[in-house]
Amino acid sequence: MERAELVAELKTLRKGRGLQASRLSDRVGPSLRSACGVSEPDGMVAIRAKLTGRLSELATHLPDDLQVALLAAFAITPEARQPLYQERVRWAASRVDRDPRTVRRRVDEAIELLAELALASPAGSSPGSWHTSALTVALVLEESCVFEQHRVVADQDGLRSFDLAVGAGTVLYGGTLSEGTVEPPLSLSRGESWEFAAVFPVEPATHLVYVPRHRCEVFDLRVRFGKEGPSEVLALDGAFERDIADSGYRGRTLRPDAAGEVHLQFRHLTPGLVYGARWADQS
């Protein structure tokens, strides 16, 4: 499923009566069906329920103003079920105290973000089984290695493993690692936390980013460049994946300290968005 296709289908869906359209199934394309778990036998009631539930759940990860604009645009909010999209935009504008033109731009922004979130957390996955309370990463470019320490919390009883976006590395403590899946020595109970740490080899790079698939409360990142590092480093804070290489992206910049290091910390990360650092190629 391509992001551009999903964005186009979402923009089509918001037209007219949105999710309250009488021939809704005709307006739900293959990307949207996949993102919302709609199957071939589903009737109109089931399709509307699945789309409403999925889009509402994903919208909870958006900033408040974007959430208001998005739920109104699709006529999910009961008070904003006017028959025309322009009327729903005016309703949202009154709620967020902005003019309708600004709200239309925010709906477009929210749809782009919603597509990123949908691709990061496919329908039918179980992102609620665990979450990350803290992730600490230290990239040492001089040694071509990265250290990662994950503190995860079980959100259900009997958690036996959790998937991490990591490759083959040397486990320092906390269990076993196989193809990105970590297995602690014992199953975890709901609310129980566990730490896992490992060291991984890395190739020369111009960025280090983390795209959480589950809720993450704190991401602490240190990059050590050494004496021959870049003059400045760009922070990627809640960016889209395309922004990793986009020269037009504007974000906070930092200068490495006297030891050639930078330190970044991110809190309350949104699943599906990019957090980390980018710098110029020094080769």
Image (cartoon, rainbow, N blue to C red):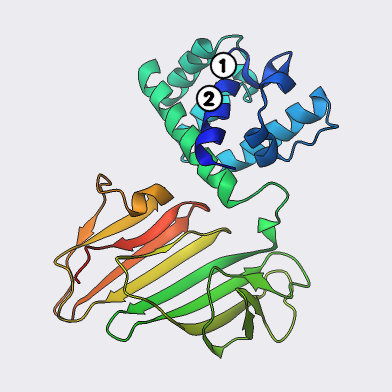
Label 1, secondary structure: give it. loop
In this view, 266 is above or below 29: below
Measured from the top left, where is residue 51 in percent x and y? 69, 32
Q: Which residue is mark 1?
A: 15
Instruction: Give me the residue at 62% from left, 75% from top.
Output: 179
In this picture, residue 138 sits left or right of residue 120: left
Q: Position of residue 226 (x, y in %)?
A: 20, 81
Task: Please tell me how crowded label 2 is: few (under 14), some (14-19), or many (20+) other residues with Cα within 10 Å.
Answer: some
Q: Are marks 2 and 1 in contact (CB under 8 Å)?
A: yes
Q: Is residue 159 above or below residue 13?
A: below
**Image side of residue 219 versus residue 214, left or right:** left
Q: Is residue 279 or residue 128 the one in the foreground?
A: 279
- State the residue at coordinates (54%, 34%): 5
The quarter of the picture where the C terminus appears is: bottom left
Q: Please tell me whether residue 84 is drawn above or below residue 216 in the rendered image.
A: above
Q: Which mark is residue 11?
A: 2
Report the residue at 63% width, 36% height from top: 31
CA distance for labels 2 and 1: 7 Å
Residue 189 quadrant? bottom right
